[in-house]
Amino acid sequence: MSSRRPASRLATTIPAGNGSNGERNSVVLGPNDRLVGQLFIEGDLRVSGSVEGELEATGDIEITGRVNGAVTAYNRLVVGSAGSLIGGDVRVARLTVEDGATFTGKVTMGKPTAKEPTPIEPVPATIEPVVEPVVVAQPKGKRR
């Protein structure tokens, strides 16, 4: 199973409730969990473990563990007092860094928007006819 986000992914709208019972989806990485790579969540994300890579969530992200990489929270990012976010670019609508937290990186504020994929133009197939020479056999016989 790949943790890479497909490049062909179409931009999705952020549903008010995208869980099975109408509640927002929520994913938790516990204190003993470790993620290396990219993670995209439609909903909220809580990180108590460690992450080496990129995180993106359409809801809130709360970090009480360690994250080394880029973070995009469409709503709110909270770096808790025991948490650390190091070396990544952060795109958020709202940011809270609590006392005692470690934060290093560049912040872009404002409501992040889903990236529109570049449309792929179909390439018309060019079919060139294959012309083979036709050999007409000369009748055998006397030459005059």
Image (cartoon, helix red, strand yellow):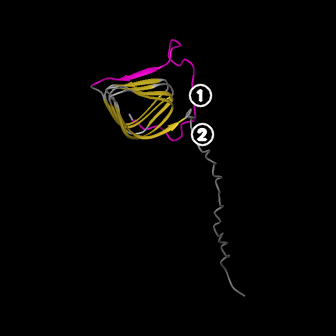
Where does label 1 land, which residue? Answer: 13
Cα–Cα span, label 2 and label 1:
11 Å
Image-quadrant location for residue 31: top left
Give the residue at the far right of this rendering: 144
136 sits to left or right of 44: right
Say whether residue 7 is magenta: yes
The quadrant of the image that shows the C terminus is: bottom right
State yes or no: discs 2 and 1 in contact (Cβ < 8 Å).
no
Label 2 environment density (alpha carbons within 10 Å; few <14, some 14–19, many ≥20): few
Q: Which residues are magenta?
A: 2-31
Q: Quadrant of residue 89?
A: top left
The residue positioned farthest toward the left in the image shown: 32
- Which residue is denoted by mark 2 in the rendering? 116
Kindly give the residue lying farthest to the top in the view shown. Answer: 21
Q: Give me the residue at 61% from left, 46% from top.
A: 120
Mark 1 surroundings within 10 Å by alpha-carbon count, few (fewer than 14), some (14 through 19), many (20 or more): few
Instruction: Relative to 77, say whether 131 is above or below.
Output: below
Say whether residue 130 is left or right of residue 17: right
Q: Amino acid at mark 2?
A: Glu
Q: Looking at the image, which residue sits at the far bottom?
A: 144
Tag 1 or tag 2, which sits nearer the N-term? 1
User: Percent position (x, y) of residue 29?
Assistant: 35, 25
- On the image, the x and y values in percent for residue 51 come to 34, 34
Residue closest to the eye, 28 or 85 = 85
Of the residues shown, which amino acid type is indicated by label 1? Answer: Thr
The chief SS type of the magenta part is loop
Q: Position of residue 142 (x, y in %)?
A: 68, 83
Q: Nearer the viewer, residue 120 or 122?
A: 120
The stretch drawn in magenta includes residue 103: no
Q: Nearer the viewer, residue 102 or 72?
A: 102
